[in-house]
Amino acid sequence: MNSKDIIKITLNLVAICAVAGVILSVVWAVTNPVRLEKKAEELRAAQKALVPQAQNITEALKFVSAGGKEGVIYKATADGKTVGYIIKAYAKGYSSFIEMLVAVDIDYRIIGIQILSEQETPGLGAEMEKKWFKDQFRGKTEDHLIVMKGETKTDIQAISGATISSRAVTNGVKAAVDALRAERAKDRAL
Amino acid sequence: MAASYKKLILNGIFSENPVFRLALSLCPAVAVTTSVRNGFLMGVAVLCVMTMVNITVSILRNLINPKVRIPAYILIIATYVSITEMMMRAYSRTAYKQMGLYIQLIVVFAIIISRAELFASRNKVLPSAADGFGMGLGFLGALVLVGAVRELIGKGSIAGFHITASSPLLIMVLPTGGFFVIGLLMGLFNWIDQRYYGGRPGGGGGGHH
Amino acid sequence: MDTEKNPQVEARVFRASVGPHISSGESVPHIMWTVSAALLPAAGLSIYYFGLPALSVLVLSIVSAIVFEALAQKLAGAKITISDGSAILTGLLLGMNLPASVPFYLPVIGSAVAVIITKQLFGGLGYNIFNPALIGRAFLMASFPRFMTTWPLPQGSLSLARPDAVTGATPLGILKEEGYRKLLSHFASRHDMYVQLLLGHRGGAMGETGIVALLFGAAYLLYKGYITWHIPVTFIATVAVLTAVFGGDPWLAMLSGGLVLGAFFMATDYVTVPQLKRAQVAFGLGCGIITALIRLEGGYPEGVCYAILLMNCFTPLLDRAFKAKKFGEASAKA
């Protein structure tokens, strides 16, 4: 291979890279704003569904959630008063990190939870996305965030056959509330 | 001419089906085929990428230096896959959430680079397009078939419509079930080939090379 | 292709030439029937504990294993060999691996997977890579987790039950979910716990409960020379040592779960485990490490089944790795 060949080959690849780069930049420029907008919209919709009375939901601060992932605390306000908090947190499930939103009022009572993403066993752990499971959290305080295998009215009833995933969600909710409590202790203004 | 294009397309669907006959790109065939929908979406993504890659490689076949043809093909494939991924992220978010990771993996699918190398780099644009389209259709068909079997046995539904109330055999929607279904379907295809078309025992097209 | 095939051919040739277990001139059917017979005390005890449902699960899995074996061989145009007792043993072992309360179709599906997919599709007895009964169990575990983790309690035993309940967790399940202290609180004392575990007064799969009966059968097989101590002893000892090292209760580890059944009756299957003594020790060690890892760190409370299946994959490798030493041993003995 002489030097002329090397230049030819290099130019060949450079040309392909350049064309590919231009095409990709154009596609990115067109699709990225759409993607960001849709993502923000999804988060807003999930938050709105959790705390319908909130007029304004703003990001307050970030904290470290399970697995070193970034958790976020959002503050929900109505008529200038804080009506609750929404915490985006993670929990280590049976086969994945479960990404969820936990909404609490100012007394740390759970308003509701949303599962944003999970990769648990379909038909078992993934049942956590079902309404009956998520609805159990409504109105619970921290000391009732305990998983029970049988039927329970006061605590959290496990998805049958998926105790690990049920416990992961419950402990994740608990950890999210704890994180909020800790941050509020540090920062009175929150 | 028309007849030979038809033959090229049918070749990819039946006699050289990427999954069941060539045994190529089995990873996605196991990973994403938990339902008809997922198999279909993945299949369509691969079909688009394959057809476009074959066309592009065929057009550029005299411009690409043979010494760097493999990096060049990978670049072309990666470009189309990135475009597909960005489009899905913006316009088809639910589908992207379910299979985003696997969409990126299309870059390294053996079936795409092997068709670029074996066919598109040596043939004119239209036959290359037909080959890519046929192979893509074969892949799509295989993924939908595997997805249908797994969804039916694993969840008791077909394309989201419930047939039974509960899941009959949960293992089928787990990765393990993917291996079972593909293995058994591959056996079935070989058996049909052997019995009705006189193929060699053990699969005429079963070579991995 | 040729280079790929060679090791298998070698392994088979050398297996046939050594045949350490079959050296006394015993036929395959004789061994299969004897191993099945050695399981009978444990099977009998489980029927005593769990009643008619246990009997029906055992009968169903045995009968369907025989039927599927005959069916698969007929379809493949092969000689029907159901009288060699291997299908009966597979069915019996599968049944012993199930809770007595499973619906009727579970043993049937399990037998189909065990006999047709795991055994006959790989070429029949002697060619299967994995233990058929264990694949059947793993398949059922992944497919019907609810049925497979609902454990009936032995009749007359209330030690692990709420007063009104007929099902309860296995000791290992309680250990994983609620901790050692909680498990201990179900018994009068630590000593009482060991005795109860030994006698089988607890929830679990049928073959997990009657440890005494299993040991009785295993002792007979050891005495007759149909199995050797290498795998079972290394397997169980490794689990006990690792459990103790990581702060657990080694006696509990040995007496709970499917360890005794797995170590003596399934990790000693002629077809799917190494033939050489040294390789067998390595096999038992591997099984023990994987079992302890799953129990201590994994998502499931019990790991014997997956440990044996994973080590089954390594059987040809282990046999090859220890091959050179084997020839030395063989000539020294001769």
Image (spheres, coloured by chain):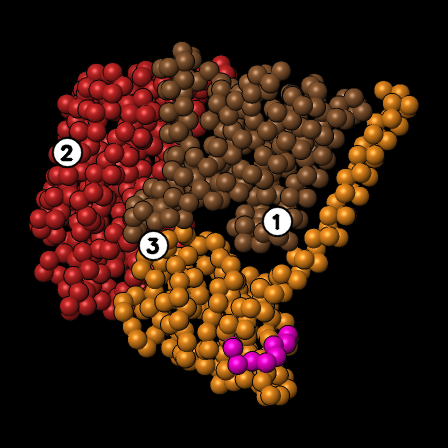
Chain colours: A orange, B brown, C red
Q: Nearer the viewer, residue B62 or C224?
A: B62
Q: Nearer the viewer, residue A40 or C321?
A: A40
* Residue in the image at 15% along x and 68% along y: C164
Magenta span contains residue A56: yes
Q: Nearer the viewer, mark 1 or mark 2?
A: 1
Q: Position of residue B197 (x, y in %)?
A: 41, 13
In this rendering, is residue C173 above or below B205? Answer: below
Q: Position of residue C223 (x, y in %)?
A: 17, 33
Q: Secondary structure at mark 3?
A: loop
**Measured Cα–Cα span from mark 1 to mark 2:** 52 Å
* Residue in the image at 37% along x and 14% along y: B196
* Residue in the image at 46% along x and 26% along y: B20
Residue occupied by mark 2: C63
Amino acid type, mark 1: Met
Q: Can you see residue C251?
A: no
**Measured Cα–Cα span from mark 3 to mark 2:** 30 Å
Q: Is residue B11 left or right of residue C176?
A: right
The magenta stretch is A51-59
Residue B88, label in figure? 1
Q: How many labels were placed on the picture?
A: 3
**Measured Cα–Cα span from mark 1 to mark 3:** 41 Å
Q: Secondary structure at mark 1?
A: helix
Q: Are marks 1 and 3 on the same chain?
A: no
In this rendering, is residue B53 above or below A175? Answer: above
Q: Position of residue C108 (x, y in %)?
A: 21, 38
- Circles 1 and 2 in contact, beta carbons < 8 Å: no
Q: Quadrant of the C terminus of chain A?
A: bottom right
* Residue in the image at 31% along x and 60% along y: A160
